[in-house]
Amino acid sequence: MIHHLYPLQGAIQHYAWGGYNYIPQLLGVNNPDSQPFAELWMGTHHRGAAKLKVDTEEVKLADWIEQHPEGLGEKGSHFGKLPFLFKVLDVKEMLSIQSHPNKAQAEVGFRKENNLGIPLDARHRIFKDDNHKPEVMVALTDFWLLHGFKSVEALEEVLNSIPAFYPLQAHFSEKDIFALYKAVMELPQESVDEMLAPLKVALSKEDFSKDKPQYWAKKAFETHQLEGGHYDRGIFSIFFFNLVYLKAGQGIYQGAGIPHAYLEGVNVELMANSDNVFRGGLTPKHIDVPELLKHLIFDPVVPKILEGEHIADFELAYKTPAPDFQLNRISLKAGEVYEQQGSDVPQILIVLEGIAIDNTDKKWSKGTSCFAPAGANYRLKAVEDSLIFKACLP
């Protein structure tokens, strides 16, 4: 095997919630029809497989790894395939409230749905595979998201200060977050509409800043109305979950069972390869309330913002408990050199700013990405100030 950097072409996902400019400008492509460019996928996922350029030919990264399993290295071979999916996301409209199972839950759920004969592409299918889906993200712009349940005291404040939520106080008399959330998730749609209608009216009379849940609830009323004019019960969760702001360079980890939703901004995201999602609102997609309630963590969460840990010259690592991935940030001033000597894990790199030249004199400019198999030796010298993110294994 030749140990160098292979050019990688990611796959674009044009989901409706995506922005129109960031990813096209990053990749240097036109968007004359103003299509949403929501995500850039760099990995082996079957719904968006990246391609390698090997000499003059293009080959799917998954196929190349199958033919060269040594490219995974010893750590990667434990998974039998590339264990992570690397993404750039441009979130223009808020994404659905969701959570993910741990590995044991995924294996049990996947086996159960298979035994029931539920097709993998069925709308009500929850477990698409037997894997967990932890995620780490780092903001590239100002970024807003929901992450985990608020403290008991903060939830009491919500229920006592918003008149539309007064009827919910009875469900929180024992300060039980599970009881409160179960109540709103099991409310008949007619009751959801009756409770949220006056809130919509109240919010329409004021302007709010982004650090207030009212701002995002008001936006959700405008952008996430359900078929038939009904209101989305995910609006309750905007007030129940922590509202988190990240500035560029800060990150956060979403472990199993932590409810979360991306609201706005651009980020890089690294996750385990899985499609297992429990949805909790802000979506027209299927919501399986019993499965959601069974798998969520109802303990209050204090969001832990990741600043990155220095691990080498010019390099920060956003470390998490996940064995499937690690996200690193490489910042180079013009003239500085980053070297990688025979790493024992596979890597995917993307240049987000600047230009760097490798040891074969190949130029890697803004928007280019590459795959480095385990054992690759490479050297990157910045022609101008450069920002590079690297997906690898811990």
Image (tube, helix red, strand yellow):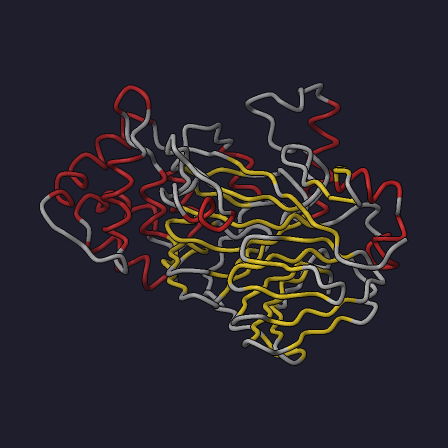
Q: Left or right: where does residue 76 sit relative to residue 339?
A: right
361 relative position to 334: left or right: right
Q: Position of residue 217 (x, y in %)?
A: 27, 45
Residue 207 versus residue 333 in the image, above or below = above
From the top left corner, tell me how far across and down residue 3 is, in percent. 84, 59
294 or 361, which is in the foreground? 361
Q: Residue furthest front?
A: 361
Judged from this view, the residue extending furthest toward the left is 205
Residue shown at 88% from the left, 48% from the top? 69
Nearer to me, 306 or 227: 306
Which residue is pictured at 69% across the width and 55% down the height? 348
Q: Position of residue 295 (x, y in %)?
A: 57, 44
Name the residue nearer the viewer: 73 or 367: 367
Q: Is residue 316 left or right of residue 77?
A: left
Q: How many marks?
A: 0
Q: Is residue 372 above or below residue 280?
A: below
Measured from the top left, where is residue 258 in percent x and y? Answer: 52, 53
Q: Residue at x 53, y 59 (%)?
A: 352
Quadrant showing the C terminus: bottom right
Question: 184 or 204, which lies in front?
Answer: 204
Residue 361: image quadrant is bottom right
